[in-house]
């Protein structure tokens, strides 16, 4: 197990993974150490190898294969995350919940950025010879909930803490930084559209942090809001788990899924909210399990 710890430690350091993630990574590694070592080393030792596309598969330098059709499904999910968020932000800009002069402009900046992202992803999908599919009902339910939030305090936390730390940060920091560096060149095109959003994104994040540290909402309100959103986020991940199963990385994606749910709760804890991330993860999973019975 020392060898596993050594390799996992090198990955965490290489990709600047937060320290709090370490025990979860090690717990996952104990379940299948040989598979973990092989999979982890394949990402580190890619050197100058390149990916390829053959027989309808995207083949990464580490040997991981993903069907192009599965890749398109993933891109469709990302497209609708951006597209639906853009539509939500436009509604917020037109019907702001108080603080009109302060947040209407921010909402339009958010809407424009998300729309730009969506267009880039749509162009990529169509450039690969495919069309945009229909959005998942679970994804629509998530953004319907977000759209109906009745205060800017909740909206700011929802967008800049909960969604950012579950979708963007978790899958970005834990997976995207690793995958991106070894992916085929054509996969990188849409990444460029996500640059240049730092100003409005930083402002939104700082405003959300201010809401939390200044106790504009109670710990109970913040926790309840976060839990409600993450139950919906988890449903959107679980409904697409078949993609991971086809690629033979179901266990890895389940691990990433749990980290995605833990991330916002951990962030809230660090900002002073009285919360137990592990218990909240179990509560979110329990609620999703009950709804699927």
Image: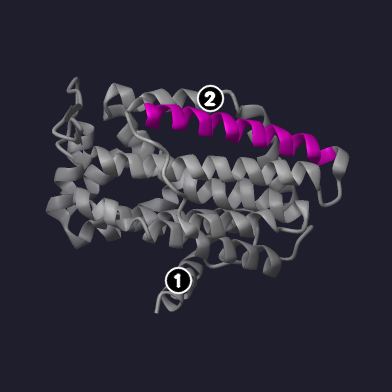
Label 2 neighbour load within 10 Å: few <14, some 14-19, many 20+: few
Residue 271 in the image: above or below residue 273: above
What residue sits 31% from the left and 40% below the top? 71
Magenta-highlighted residues? 102-126
Q: Nearer the viewer, residue 271 or 161?
A: 161
Q: Nearer the viewer, residue 250 or 129?
A: 129
Does the magenta run of residues contain 120? yes
In the picture of the structure, the residue carrying the numbered disc 1 is 288
Q: Quadrant of the C terminus?
A: bottom left
Q: Is residue 133 visible?
A: yes
Q: Residue 189 vs residue 54: left or right?
A: right
What residue sits 42% from the left and 48% below the top? 19
Does the magenta run of residues contain 122? yes
Q: Quadrant of the N terminus?
A: bottom left
> Which disc is residue 195 wearing?
2
Applied colour scheme: one colour
């Amino acid at each position: 197990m020392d060898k596993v710890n050594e390799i996992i430690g090198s990955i965490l350091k290489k990709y600047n993974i937060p320290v709090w993630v370490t025990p979860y990574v090690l717990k996952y590694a104990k379940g299948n150490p040989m598979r973990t070592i092989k999979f982890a080393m394949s990402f580190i030792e890619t050197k100058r190898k390149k990916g390829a596309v053959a027989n309808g598969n995207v083949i990464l330098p580490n040997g991981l294969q993903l069907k192009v059709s599965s890749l398109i499904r993933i891109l469709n999910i990302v497209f609708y995350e951006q597209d639906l968020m853009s539509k939500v932000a436009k509604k917020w800009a037109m019907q702001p919940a108080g603080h009109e002069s302060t947040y209407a402009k921010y909402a339009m900046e958010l809407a424009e950025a998300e729309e730009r992202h969506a267009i880039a992803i749509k162009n990529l999908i169509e450039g690969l010879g495919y069309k945009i599919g229909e959005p998942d009902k679970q994804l629509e339910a998530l953004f319907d909930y977000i759209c109906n939030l009745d205060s800017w305090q909740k909206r700011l936390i929802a967008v800049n803490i909960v969604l950012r730390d579950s979708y963007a940060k978790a899958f970005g920091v834990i997976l995207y930084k690793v995958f991106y560096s070894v992916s085929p060149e054509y996969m990188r095109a849409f990444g460029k559209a996500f640059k240049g959003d730092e100003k409005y994104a930083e402002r939104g994040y700082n405003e959300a942090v201010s809401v939390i540290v200044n106790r504009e909402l109670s710990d109970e309100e913040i926790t309840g809001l976060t839990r409600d959103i993450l139950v919906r986020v988890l449903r959107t991940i679980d409904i697409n788990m078949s993609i991971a199963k086809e690629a033979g990385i179901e266990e890895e994606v389940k691990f990433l899924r749990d980290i995605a749910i833990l991330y916002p709760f951990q962030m809230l804890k660090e900002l002073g909210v009285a919360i137990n991330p592990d218990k909240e993860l179990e509560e979110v999973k329990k609620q999703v399990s009950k709804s699927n019975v």
